[in-house]
Image (spheres, helix red, strand yellow):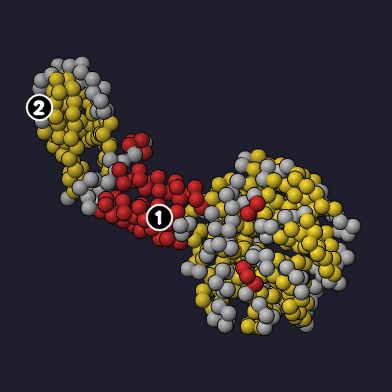
Amino acid sequence: MIDAPVQKTISLSGNVRHVDISNDGGFALATYPQGYAIIIGDEVVHRKGTITRARIIREKDSFVVAENHSLLFFNNHGALLWRNNYDSKIIDFSFTSSEGLVLLENGDVVALSNFKIELWKITVPGAKRVIIDPTGRNFAVITDKEINFYTFNNHNLQWNEGFMDNIHHVYLNRGSTRIAVSLVTGDFYLLSKSGKTMLEYKFKKPPVVVLDRYGNVIVGEENYVKIMNERGTVLKKIEFSGMCNELKVGYRSDYSVCGTSSGMVYFFDRSGVLWQHHHNEPIGAVNMSDSGDYVIAANSEVIIFNNLSYYVSVIRDMQKKIAAVPAKDPRREKLSNIIRKMKGAYLKRDFKLLLNLANAFDSLYTAIERNTVKFALILADSFSVDTVSKCQLYVATNERVSLKVYGDVKYGVRVVQRVPGKTVISILLQPKHSGKLSVRIDVFAGAKKISIPVTIFADGILRKKRVISNTDFRRLIS
């Protein structure tokens, strides 16, 4: 498992109720009791108001806010584009990239094209929610105990399904091939596009439910998330900490995110948790971009995670590590192959493969490190045939260290420090003649041997390289 790729954390005045983020991570949205905040890069714009709902329209790079009787449309910089006013208060809305539905307090459901042109209107007494599926072909209107399912173009009622108890949560997948319904009693139903019950399940508490793009049911409960197929077969059970407060899935990816009562954020797929993050307060709101590139979570703070930039930095660090591996080591090519595969997985947004490859790289590199004696040799400022110059050798090892020097130099050796994990040796060098000299220092650490080729210049001729190291010498000499 990797460290959580936290990009930024932003403090807000009040507990956040809903968060959203654009597909390119360029801007985010957070609503709280006093209003809402627009997060654009490092800038945060706060706006006060009584907000019913706010959502980002990712395909249009814009967002919509419902405030009392008005529906407000903004661009990604927070500039107001236009406003729709209604006689009755707005209690819900749902949009795709071009079509949308607005639910008013009087039960009217108003269909919009391009967010402002009214297409038609129907009335559903007692309506509490509207949901349009991501394709825009179908929509559902939910009352306390009933689901009414329509086609969008002709707004004809296709079917309705009533329940004995109040509805807690409804989710439509892409194309409405599956509809998930949970009741306040903990009863769960999976319906087909025709309204037929495909699966019934009983949970202890009302679960948080989403559907992945394959039609599998992802259920968030206390201390775990369960992934089931349409027959109720449990495909995967992933242990979490705390009650799942909110669960979101990427429409164009295999990834999901969950925020829990114990302050945990989990980013996962059907194989398990890919990364997790602990915060000091319960996480009440989460969301993610369609492909899973960006994740957002919130309580009184908004936390934005960037999977893309994280793996860019991981690959860069790997390339630096390869530079320290001896060129003749055959495992160096294996490390290079892993990086090439990671670049391909990065382009495909395959975060699971990226994680597996990163783990494979770490395992192989750790094995190489165990067999590599790390050293740092700091040469003297100058060399002369008339004087003795002191050099310092640092060796990271628990083994006993000795060395030999070869070349046209006189030398002496003295161990300055020997502590667990590190030996420091002072090497005194005196050239036998002026000019350029090639010197080799053989270091023996237990059964391991390393040869350090050194070029020095005697009698005032400047050298090009004073530090010779196969590791981070600053860390080694500290």
Viewer-side residue, 283 vs 83: 83
Residue on which the image places disc 2: 408
Residue at image coords 27%, 46%: 325
Q: CA distance from mark 1 to mark 2?
A: 51 Å
Residue at image coords 26%, 52%: 333
How far across and how far down the image is residue 436, in percent?
15, 23
> Splitting the image into 4 quarters, where does residue 287 fall?
bottom right
Mark nearest the camera among 1 and 2 is 1
Q: Is residue 347 visible?
A: yes
> Splitting the image into 4 quarters, where does residue 441 fall?
top left
Residue 300, above or below 389: below
Residue on which the image places disc 1: 344
Q: Secondary structure at mark 1?
A: helix
From the viewer's perspective, tell me whether residue 102 is left or right of residue 230: right
How far across and how far down the image is residue 386, in percent?
14, 16
Q: Secondary structure at mark 2?
A: loop
Of mark 1 and mark 2, the one earlier in the sequence is: 1
Amino acid of disc 1: Gly
Residue count near mark 1 (Cα–Cα under 10 Å), binned few <14, some 14–19, many ≥20: few
> How many marks overall?
2
